[in-house]
Amino acid sequence: ASCASVTPNPDTLVLPLDSPVVGSVADGLGGHPFGDLASTIVVQTLARIGPLLRGEDAVRQALDLCNGRVYEEAGHDVSRTGMGTTVAGVVLVGDVVHVFNVGDSRVYLHGPDGLQRVSVDDSPPLGPGETHTAIVTRTLGGYGGPSPTEPHLSTRPLDERERYLACTDGLTDVVDDAAIARVLDGQSGVAATYELWRAAIAAVSSFVVNGE
């Protein structure tokens, strides 16, 4: 299944684990054209080939395929030049979890030892007082012509005590890691998803009210 639209409430999907299962998010690049199209191409491509992703090499090849398809679609119309997206997610395969990302969308692990970021932000170091940046140094698509990308990939053992959160900077730019951890400490499943969504909406509303 894939979702490429704004939804007023979180949705819950229950999927069997008898074949590889992909959970991912993609976030079109701000300031670039057709980010919604680029992100849709990526999540739909991953959803379609997800059952084939049995290892890091397969995940890497899938992300290369996504990158190529974004550039291919951009080449159909000059107005789409530079369209691109970030992506982050996990592939559950048997007793392991493959974590991947390109850009500044993130994957967190939450378990007995608390919250841990297991993805790598593709962005320059933050300056004094900065909490986030709009600059992204690796993307799928995003340039004037085809350009390779190098995804971040890691593999971890699957532990039923742990949960994974894949999210865009729509959450992490406005809700810090400590607040995310507090939600996941106290909630699980759809309740946790809803509380994170509500925290992000509340933070954005506060910025607007305060004129920031």
Image: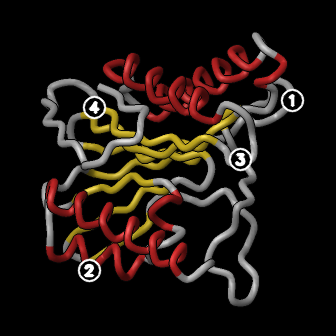
Which element type, helix, strand or loop, lies under badge 1? loop
Q: CA distance from mark 2 to mark 4?
A: 27 Å
* Amino acid of disc 2: Arg
Q: Quick one: SS at disc 3?
A: loop
Mark nearer the N terminus (4 vs 1): 4
Instruction: Say which of marks 4 and 1 sits in front.
Output: 1
Instruction: Point out residue 67 in the picture as x, y percentages from the top left corner.
Output: 65, 27
The alpha-carbon separation of the residues under discs 4 and 1 comes to 33 Å
Mark seen at residue 144: 1
Task: State the residue at coordinates (73%, 73%).
Answer: 125
| Distance from the alpha carbon under mark 1 to that under mark 2 | 42 Å
**Which mark is on residue 21?**
4
Query: Which of the two labelled residues, at mark 3 and mark 2, occupies the earlier sequence position?
Result: 3
Q: Is residue 154 left or right of residue 123?
A: left
Callout 2 environment at 10 Å: few (<14), some (14 to 19), or many (20+)?
A: some
For badge 3, the amino acid type reads: Arg
Say left or right for 98 vs 209.
left
What residue is shown with label 2?
182
Eyeballing the image, is 185 above or below 46? below
